[in-house]
Amino acid sequence: MKKLLLLPLVILLLVSFSFAYELAVDSKTDSLVILTFSDLKTLDVKFIDVTATAETNTISDTYIVDTSLSTTTDSILLSIDISSLKEDYPQINSILISGYIESEGIQEKFSKRIFLRPESTPNRSLAPELSSSEMIYWTVGLAVLLVIMIILFIFLREPKEIIIPKKVKRKSKKKAKKKKAKKKRL
């Protein structure tokens, strides 16, 4: 019975540590990108170390960018000034915006890739886009849950009784002949 109570406790602990939100591009211009953070538990959040990486065909360069916050009824809008990137690199294929979001003492990394040229196809050598942290949490949570269940199965199962067969000694032919000879004499 105790084994069955342990599994729901582990699941509750995994769910309580998840800090899920939805990240989307609200709008983009040549000098400004606005990201929307929705499905947050609270609108009291803080953004730390927001950077933008300009990615061209041959080079990528990271800049610390100016940001401003605004809120709507159920989401937060993060405005990012990318004009300095456009001045240095006029042929930017995409911009990777990343940083940390902090809420209620929990800090989590976010990133979003924004393609600036509609005719360009995504380059496979670029880092993958993280559109939602929810998928990451589900994947990690399920992997941790699977590992915990395997460990519990290994340590909590009752060991099987091992039956060791007795060795059968073969009598040598000489001893067998001597015994037959003794029986005949008697």
Image: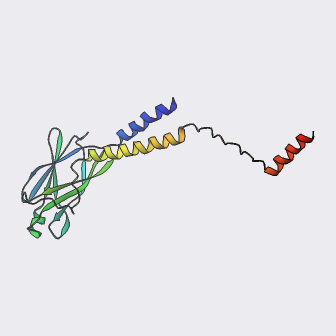
Can the viewer see residue 104?
A: no
- Which residue is pictured at 51% across the width and 42% down the height? 154
Q: Quadrant of residue 92?
A: bottom left
> Viewed as shown, does residue 170 lie left or right of 116?
right
- Which residue is pictured at 16% across the width and 65% down the height? 55
Q: Residue furthest top?
A: 1
Tell which of 119 and 36 is nearer to you: 119
Looking at the picture, how far across and down is residue 132, in whole percent? 23, 47
Looking at the picture, how far across and down is residue 69, in whole percent? 16, 50
Tell which of 118 and 107 is nearer to you: 118
Looking at the picture, how far across and down is residue 97, in whole percent? 19, 57
Position of residue 116 relative to residue 185, above or below, is: below
Tag count in the figure? Answer: 0
Tell which of 32 and 120 is nearer to you: 120
- Which residue is pictured at 43% across the width and 45% down the height? 147
Q: Quadrant of residue 15?
A: top left
> Viewed as shown, does residue 184 lie left or right of 135?
right
> Viewed as shown, does residue 66 lie left or right of 183?
left
The structure's colour scheme is rainbow
Can the viewer see residue 140?
A: yes
Looking at the picture, how far across and down is residue 30, in whole percent? 6, 59
Look at the image and tell me in which quarter the C terminus lies. top right
Q: Residue furthest front?
A: 184
Q: Residue furthest right?
A: 186
